[in-house]
């Protein structure tokens, strides 16, 4: 005769199976309910991070955050129906912070590359990003990219542009000496001071910097890098998929109704059509 609570019989086996099935259904339902976009809309706030040392995309002016990304994401936040909280971090902390779920999205302009696409979910492009060089305006020795042979080159640590100039420099003889900087402003300061001969960055960044200091800097044309684009970055997990899709829909709408062109003209002096899907990277 079985004691009360003894589940070794057929009835007990069925009971355990039923309880296990109920637990699995509950766990599955909880997983299905996990959705970053829903959480953001419930809170009414989206937390986004960037490095505010990358003009004209992101910079501080009198402690106020300004730039292309600020103007553009303000419009995206309106489309999502939430307020944006902007977080300033060193570039080297931005992508690791996203992976650690310290915020919802990275709006630092990140170059789309094959390796990064394996790890992150990119939005549709927010700008062209082809790598280029900037020299001192009075330097007559550098007139094309190949002229950096044997020169000193500066660029942002961990950036696609720095990786590209290292690869490009390896094809020259003698190869240039490449110096890495925490942010672009430090590279520009050393360029102005003569400690490096060129700074590398995306063409939009350099065009903006040169326009601000015409007597100091000049862009070296043509760009040396492969055609590429900047995008924002989300996590590739299923619970983040709806957020990236919503941001993409907002960006496409903002381009179609002319708001993107207005922002581009404000910061770049011209506007250009961007892909409305994530392009296959050449880098």
Image (cartoon, grey):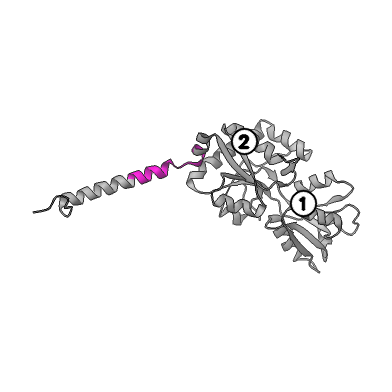
Q: Nearer the viewer, residue 133 or 226?
A: 133
Residue at image point 23% right, 50% down: 16
Q: Which residues are magenta?
A: 25-38
Q: Quadrant of the C terminus?
A: bottom right
Question: Position of 32 compared to 90: left or right?
Answer: left
Q: Where on the picture, by quarter, is residue 250?
A: top right
x and y, in percent, of residue 55 in the image? 75, 45
Q: Main secondary structure of the magenta part?
A: helix
x and y, in percent, of residue 103 in the image? 57, 45
x and y, in percent, of residue 242 in the image? 51, 40
Query: In what element is the residue under mark 1?
Result: helix
Tell me if mark 1 has few (under 14), some (14-19) or many (20+) residues whose alpha carbon lies within 10 angstroms of its own: some
x and y, in percent, of residue 164 in the image? 71, 59
Say which residue label 2 marks.
Answer: 76
Residue at image point 83% right, 44% down: 212
Q: Is residue 84 visible?
A: yes
- Whether the magenta-drawn stretch holds residue 101 is answered as no
Q: Quadrant of the N terminus?
A: bottom left
Label placed on residue 11:
none
Tell me if mark 2 has few (under 14), some (14-19) or many (20+) residues whose alpha carbon lies within 10 angstroms of its own: many
Say which residue label 1 marks.
Answer: 185
- Please say if the residues under marks 1 and 2 sit with CB atoms less than 8 Å apart: no
Q: Is residue 132 visible?
A: no
Gap between marks 1 and 2, in whole Å?
28 Å
Number of callouts: 2
**Nearer mark to the viewer, of 1 and 2:** 1
Q: Where on the picture, by quarter, is residue 166?
A: bottom right
Residue at the bottom extreme?
A: 174
Residue at the left extreme?
A: 1
Q: Nearer the viewer, residue 210 or 102?
A: 102
The mark that comes first in sequence, 1 or 2, is 2
Query: In what element is the residue under mark 2?
Result: helix
């Amino acid at each position: 005769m079985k004691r009360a609570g003894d589940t070794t019989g057929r009835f007990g086996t069925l009971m355990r199976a039923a309880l296990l099935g109920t637990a699995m259904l509950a766990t599955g339902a909880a997983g299905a309910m996990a959705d970053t976009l829903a959480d953001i809309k419930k809170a009414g706030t989206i937390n986004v991070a960037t490095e505010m040392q990358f003009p004209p995309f992101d910079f501080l002016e009198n402690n106020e955050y300004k730039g292309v990304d600020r103007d553009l994401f303000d419009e995206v936040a309106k489309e999502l129906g939430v307020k944006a909280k902007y977080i300033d971090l060193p570039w080297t902390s931005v992508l690791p912070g996203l992976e650690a779920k310290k915020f919802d999205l990275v709006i630092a302009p990140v170059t789309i590359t094959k390796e990064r696409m394996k790890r992150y979910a990119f939005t549709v492009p927010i700008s062209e990003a082809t790598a280029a060089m900037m020299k001192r305006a009075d330097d007559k020795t550098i007139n094309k990219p190949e002229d950096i042979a044997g020169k000193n080159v500066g660029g942002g640590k961990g950036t696609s542009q720095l990786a590209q100039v290292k690869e490009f420099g390896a094809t020259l003889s003698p190869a240039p000496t490449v110096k890495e900087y925490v942010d672009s402003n430090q590279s520009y300061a050393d360029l102005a001071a003569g400690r490096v001969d060129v700074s590398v960055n995306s063409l939009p960044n350099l065009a903006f910097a040169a326009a601000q200091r015409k007597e100091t800097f000049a862009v070296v044309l043509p760009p040396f890098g492969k055609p590429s684009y900047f995008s924002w970055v989300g996590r590739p997990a299923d619970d983040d998929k709806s957020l990236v899709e919503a941001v993409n829909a907002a960006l496409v709408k903002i381009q179609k109704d002319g708001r993107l062109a207005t922002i581009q003209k404000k910061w770049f002096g011209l506007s250009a059509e961007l892909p409305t899907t994530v392009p296959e990277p050449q880098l």
